Image: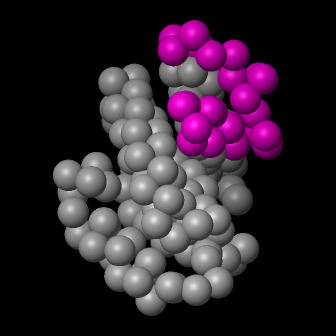
Amino acid sequence: MDQNNKDQNKRDIDTIDAYLRKMSFNPDELKKAPNIWKITQNKAEIFVIVAGGFIILQSKIMNCPKSNITTLYRKILELNDNVEQSLGAAFGINKNNEIILKMLRPMSNLGLNDFIYYLTSIAFVADQQMKELRGRFGD
């Protein structure tokens, strides 16, 4: 990473720290790494990651079930296509075989209100889908 990218990454991290403070969080207590914070909203644990000029918000929904997997895949694809239910986030499966909800947005021009909207949106969808998907497919 060249110096300009390091400087920009530092500014992006400082921005998220400042936004978290304005939301009455202590960013140092939430930090899991210099560029990663873990925030709990309702039952959802949301990881906020700053990297390469982007902010990534991610939450584990559940482990992939052993059975009924095709039905689950179809359900999460349908959720991805329904903006009213996903609020701009997307479901996927990570390398740990977990169903995750992820949102990626550019850091450029990210205001406090945008950050709050993204955080509350992913928390709402994650909490809602944790209940629905775990109830239907188990965990």
Q: Nearer the viewer, residue 28 or 124?
A: 124
Quadrant containing the N terminus is bottom right
Q: Quadrant of residue 12?
A: top right
Residue 45 shown left or right of residue 85 in the figure? right
Residue drawn where x is 50% and y is 59% of the image: 135
- The answer to whether residue 12 shows anywhere in this view is yes
In the image: residue 131, left or right of residue 78: right
- Residue 20 percent location from the top left of the image: 57, 21
Left or right of 83: which side holds 125? right
> In the rendering, at what x and y percent does residue 93 appear?
56, 74
What is the magenta range? 21-45
Tell me, yes or no, whether the highlighted magenta stretch contains residue 38. Answer: yes
Name the quadrant of the C terminus: bottom right
x and y percent of residue 58 in the render? 55, 52
- Between 117 and 12, which is closer to the camera in this rendering? 117
Residue at the image point whose x is 38% and y is 72% from the top: 76
Camera-side residue: 63 or 114?
A: 63
Could you tell me which residue is drawn at 37 percent across and 56 percent down? 89
Query: Does residue 100 show up magenta in the picture?
Result: no
Please tell me in which quadrant of the rendered image residue 119 appears: top left
Looking at the image, residue 134 lies above or below residue 14: below
